[in-house]
Amino acid sequence: MQFYTWPSTMELKISAPDGDHCAGEWIVSSKGGEHKLAGPIDSCKVTDSGIAFLVRDYRGLTMSESYWAHYTGDALVGWVEYRGYSKSSRMSGSWELRKEH
């Protein structure tokens, strides 16, 4: 994941897709284990081409981070966007997930 100020890995647990709606948990950890963020995902939608969901700001400082991705072979390749309450508070990054075997 290329988004936080520290090298990180992301884990996404999707449960019980109901049509195109789903629920799940998002976990981001630093490679050295110093940092870990986790929480439920909101507004999760799965389509034939990919997935989109929101992660509420764990600090309560902003509205949410938006994640979306498309299937590319055996991976999900996506983007993340952070929007704060002020227009000048914006960041974006990329991520890639592969199915755990």
Image (tube, rainbow, N blue to C red):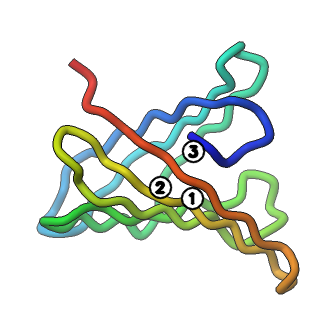
Instruction: Tell me which amino acid carries mark 3.
Output: Gly
In the rendered image, residue 5, in percent from the top left (x then y), is placed at: 80, 40
Which quarter of the picture shows residue 39?
top right
Horizontal relation, residue 67 to residue 48: left or right: right
Q: How many marks?
A: 3
Q: CA distance from mark 2 to mark 3?
A: 7 Å
Q: CA distance from mark 3 to mark 1?
A: 7 Å
Q: CA distance from mark 1 to mark 2?
A: 5 Å
Task: Give above or below for 49 relative to 23.
Answer: below
- Residue placed farthest to the bottom in the image? 87
Mark 2 residue element? strand
Q: Which residue is mark 3?
A: 39
Instruction: Tell me which amino acid carries mark 1.
Output: Val
Q: Earlier in the sequence, mark 1 or mark 2?
A: 2
- Residue at x-position 66% and y-position 63%: 92
Instruction: Tell me which amino acid carries mark 2.
Output: Ile
Q: Which residue is mark 1?
A: 55
- Residue at x-position 67% and y-position 37%: 37
- Residue placed farthest to the top in the image? 32
In the rendered image, residue 49, in percent from the top left (x then y), is placed at: 19, 65
Quadrant, the C terminus: top left
Task: Give above or below for 49 relative to 34.
Answer: below
In the rendered image, residue 7, in percent from the top left (x then y), is placed at: 69, 29
